[in-house]
Amino acid sequence: MAYGEPAREMMALQCARLVHLIVIGKRQATFIDDVLQRSTGQNVLNSASADVLVSPLDPAALSPSNADAQAVKGT
């Protein structure tokens, strides 16, 4: 597990493992997050030499109870 600066660690792993695609889930950021801080996803997007897919995260889809319900429905 990597600690410190996640974007830098991801770039090191990309080079070490010859990664061709990085997939990042992005939570909805607040105005302050966008203006004052650069997100890990934005740093990776700007620094990666591989393709980067940024997908919005749906917090409801991440809860274990929803995963079980989706499995029962077959979706």
Image (cartoon, helix red, strand yellow):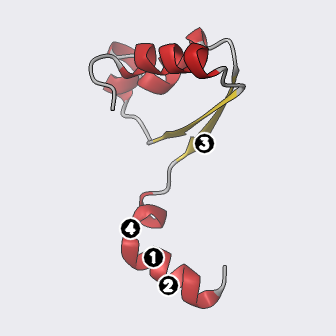
Marks 4,1: beta carbons within 8 A: yes
- Disc 3 secondary structure class: strand
Q: Residues within 10 Å of mark 4 (few under 14, many from 20)?
A: few
The image quadrant of residue 31 is top left
- Judge from the rendering whether residue 36 lies leftward or rightward of residue 74; answer left or right: left
Label 2 – label 1 distance at C-alpha: 5 Å
Disc 1 marks a residue whose amino acid type is: Asn
Which residue is at a point 52% across and 15% down the rendered structure image?
Answer: 11
The residue to which callout 2 is attached is 69
Q: Amino acid at mark 4?
A: Ser
What secondary structure is found at the residue carrying circle 2?
A: helix
Q: Are marks 4 and 3 in contact (CB under 8 Å)?
A: no
Count neighbours of disc 2 (C-alpha within 10 A) and say few if under 14, some if 14 to 19, many if 20 or more: few
Q: Quadrant of the N terminus?
A: top left
Amino acid carrying label 2: it is Ala
- Nearer the observer, 56 or 44: 44
Location of the C terminus (image quadrant): bottom right
Q: Quadrant of residue 45?
A: top right
Residue, disc 1 = 66
- Say whether marks 2 and 1 touch (CB < 8 Å): yes
Q: Which residue is mark 3?
A: 55
Label ID, residue 63: 4
**Spatial separation of the CA atoms under disc 2 and disc 4:** 10 Å
Q: Is residue 36 left or right of residue 45?
A: left
Mark 3 or 2, nearer chain start: 3
Position in image of residue 36 (x %, y %): 32, 14
Which residue is found at the position 43% from the left and 65% from the top? 60
